[in-house]
Amino acid sequence: MPLYRDEAIVLRTHKLGEADRIITLLTRHHGRVRAVAKGVRRTTSKFGSRLEPFTHVDLQLAEGRNLDTITQAETLDPFAAGVGLDYERYTAGTVMLETAERLATEEREPSLQQFLLLVGGLRAMVSGDRGPGQVLDSYLLRSLSVAGYAPSFHHCARCGVEGPHRWFNHAMGGVLCATCRVPGSASPAQATLELLGSLLAGDWPAVAAADARTRKEASGLVAAYLHWHLERGLRSMEHVER
């Protein structure tokens, strides 16, 4: 069987047989890949904890007809250790993993930007320099943008006229002017729309300056926007404290 190497983030695992696991990965060069880790559930496994969710690994894999087989695994960043120590980080990180898997829709379709966003998001989550909720919201907005669902927070999403505008509609793709407003549009505070723009742009001083009420409203809009474009909710989102 042909061999190849790639680095990856472990997204999800589930049991296979008595001692194996199927590992779902987001790789740097091969997109989303599902592979078998043989014997990984045995205490004598050479992989140990290297193939747990959140872990950034360097892998060697053998190509298979339906599933590849992991033959080597070396840890690059043990994000699982840092994320797992804090409930808020863990739940936010779990949403990031599930989002990455859902947005990398086609197996073996290269998703380099999604991979780099996920690695950067997990690194920021583990560092503790920023709140888990803000890291999550920024990651979700950026990953949606990379997937082709970039929201507009200043120009009208329908006609393009420059704002500021007071209406927001996730189905329309962002803010709407008074002329383009459609029924069901939300009317968030202007500070909330500015915060959303800062989260998308990575303007962390502006994010840090936002008050709790503004952050809460922004998080609600991000969750609604994500839910709309994924067409069904994330199971992990219900555990995030919003």
Image: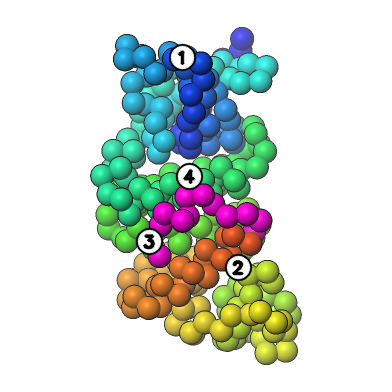
Which badge, 1 or 3, comes first in the chain's sequence?
1
**200 in the magenta segment:** no
Real-space Cα distance between discs 2 and 1? Answer: 46 Å
User: If the image is split into quadrants, where does the N terminus sit?
Assistant: top right
Q: Position of residue 104 (x, y in %)?
A: 61, 43
Real-space Cα distance between discs 2 and 3? Answer: 23 Å
In this rendering, would 76 be left or right of 232?
A: left
Q: Which residue is located at x 71 percent, y 81 percent?
A: 182
Pointer 4 residue: 97
Mark 3 nearby-residue class (10 Å; few <14, some 14–19, many ≥20):
few
Pointer 3 residue: 241
Q: Position of residue 194 (x, y in %)?
A: 47, 78
Real-space Cα distance between discs 4 and 3? Answer: 17 Å
Pointer 2 residue: 151
Q: Which residue is located at x 47 percent, y 50 percent?
A: 236
Which badge, 1 or 4, comes first in the chain's sequence?
1
Mark toward the viewer: 1 or 4:
1
The residue stretch that appears in magenta: 229-242
Q: Position of residue 27 (x, y in %)?
A: 53, 34
Q: Residue pushed farthest bottom?
A: 178
Secondary structure type for disc 2 = loop
Real-space Cα distance between discs 1 and 3? Answer: 36 Å
Mark 1 nearby-residue class (10 Å; few <14, some 14–19, many ≥20):
few
Pointer 1 residue: 18
**240 in the magenta segment:** yes
Question: Could one spot residue 148 in this view of the protein?
Answer: yes
Q: Amino acid at mark 4?
A: Leu
| Residue 196 versus residue 64 in the image, above or below | below
